[in-house]
Image (tube, rainbow, N blue to C red):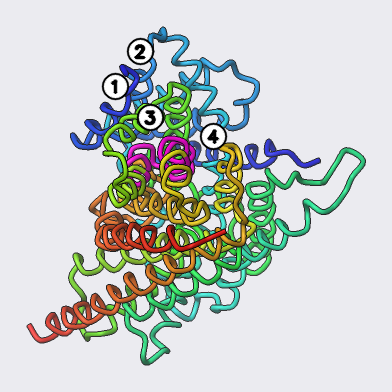
Amino acid sequence: MLSLLGLLVVVAGFALRLNPLLTVVLAAFASGLGGGQGPVQILSEFGRAFRDGRTVSVIWVVLPVIGLLEGHGLRLRAQDLISRLRRASAGRLLLAYLALRQVTAALGLTALGGHAAMVRPLIAPMAEAAAADAGPVEIPPALREEVRAHAAAADNVGAFFGEDVFVAFGSVLLIQATLRGLGVRVDSLALSLFALPSALLAFAVHGGRLLRLDRRWRAAAGETAAS
Amino acid sequence: MISPEFVYALMGVLLVGAAVTALRRAEDPDRRLKGLFWGAFGLSFVFGSELPDWANGAVVVLLAAIAASGRLRRSSATASARAPDRPRAATPSAARLFAPALAIPLLTFALTLTLPRIATPAGPLVEASRAAPICLGLAVLGALALALALLRPAPGEALERSGDLLDAVSWTAALPQSLAALGAVFAVSGVGDQVGRLLGGVIPPGQVFMAICAYTGGMALLTVLMGNAFAAFPVMASALGVPLLVRRLGADPAVVGSIGMLSGFCGTLLTPMAANFNLVPSALLELRDRYGVIRAQAPTAVVLFVGNTLLLYFLAFRPHG
């Protein structure tokens, strides 16, 4: 029971807006101390888990390429591309990206996308440019922030609600293995089929929000022009 | 046999490069602290497998202490902050810039499909379960070679630029790995099981809808707390999904499995614990609000949670074999 102390520290840490890295370390120690472990033992266990988790940080390995391309004008070219599409607006662009991400994830191509590799260098600048193009003057920074946040959101929603449809993906295999361990057999095809209604619902809900946001963004950009 | 140590070595180079770039920013008063941060993080990649466990733990504590000092703020002395916009005429064509960018995911996918199938005397060239990070590393090297050929940048520019990008994201770079480690520590101390048992005790017998809500709600809640639906699923499946929904109430296990996991993903959209999906992007996109991505996702997450609960209710109890 006392090991739930770690969970409490996590919640409190985030609620109090402590530095998240600090919160994590404090929570690890709280959890261990609550479970009756000594500090050196906690340090070792945490250290081993950190070492085993190195794979998670590998996403950063794309940064030299992205940095180089950005330094040579990638964002400018991405914005140029958007300016040439006459019907492009931020919301509709993100809707298209949501669809692309969801469909490619459902086909197993989860590598085609991602925050460091696609949202930052390409999707976010394109969406910002589309929002800015809606009016002749600079859009307010709050609008810029919101559009960028939604670029990341579209990537997440698309990936999460597309990948469970892919039969050979980790998600489906994990569910199958877990249930098998509990004595229940499920067919992986059935698992992926039952992910479809949720996938369609996700596209409808988030897509609908993007279209509504689009109208608000275009109006906000137009207002800035009029004021 | 290509091992993940190859990719960890790349990470080491990247991070030590960032440390050097940080130390070289003469105008930055925090440069030594930043150099220490990136240097320690980088060495933990290269030597992590050789260091004793407590040493790896000490590295995380050091990183957290430096982060908590608040001195890792983005420097105004980074190249991207200083450089004026290149005139359009001097900017390389879209093709030269997009090609290396798109090469990363395409090469990763191609390599993930082919490398595990190549047999060597010691086994497959790349083990299928370790394929993703290794193939990403190789794809990045390929894309980098392409970018170097197409753009002919100054030597060291790629490492300097990535150093600047890391300066912008600062300590969030270490957050996903630290949270994954915390999740493992929680799992060992049985935190998830306890939460699962607590939830299991709250349901009056025979109440189907309440049982479903406890299951989907539990998945979402546990995912919010642990930051990872894959970690929450085994707990909820063994606490509620299988014993109550499948065995006692006769629900279709495929529905329980699939929609249960998806309810967990609704939680992932809401929690700062899922750092690589929610906090890393807000750092990468330089948002002023750390929780901006979560805010953007929250309405979708809530509606989809309700939707998934209803879908489970209506789909799980159809007549099935």
Specify the subunit that label 2 lies on: A
Q: Which is closer to the viewer, label 3 or label 4?
A: 4
Specify the subunit that label 4 lies on: A
Side of A54 relative to B315 (left or right): right
Specify whether residue A176 is in view: yes
Quarter of the image that includes the N terminus of chain B: top right
Judge the density around disc 4: few (<14), some (14-19), many (≥20) Cα neighbours within 10 Å.
some
Whole-angstrom CA distance, mark 2 to mark 3, is 30 Å
Q: Tag 4 or tag 2, which sits nearer the N-term?
A: 2
In the image, which residues are magenta? Answer: B219-242
Residue, disc 4: A53
Side of B263 relative to A159 (left or right): left
Q: Tag 2 or tag 1, which sits nearer the N-term?
A: 1
Give the residue type that dot 4 points to.
Answer: Gly
Residue, disc 2: A33
Percent of width and height locating residue B147:
63, 64
Q: Is residue B230 magenta?
A: yes
Question: Do labels 3 and 1 touch, CB within 8 Å?
Answer: no
Whole-angstrom CA distance, mark 2 to mark 4, is 22 Å
Question: Do labels 4 and 1 touch, CB within 8 Å?
Answer: no
Q: Which is closer to the viewer, label 3 or label 1?
A: 1
Judge the density around disc 1: few (<14), some (14-19), many (≥20) Cα neighbours within 10 Å.
many
Q: Is residue B54 or residue A203 the one in the foreground?
A: A203
**Res. B33 mark:** 3
Q: Tag 1 or tag 4, which sits nearer the N-term?
A: 1
Question: Do labels 1 and 2 touch, CB within 8 Å?
Answer: yes
> Secondary structure under badge 2?
helix
Q: Is residue B87 or residue B51 the one in the foreground?
A: B51
Judge the density around disc 2: few (<14), some (14-19), many (≥20) Cα neighbours within 10 Å.
some
At a point 35% along the width and 56% down the height, the residue shown is B81
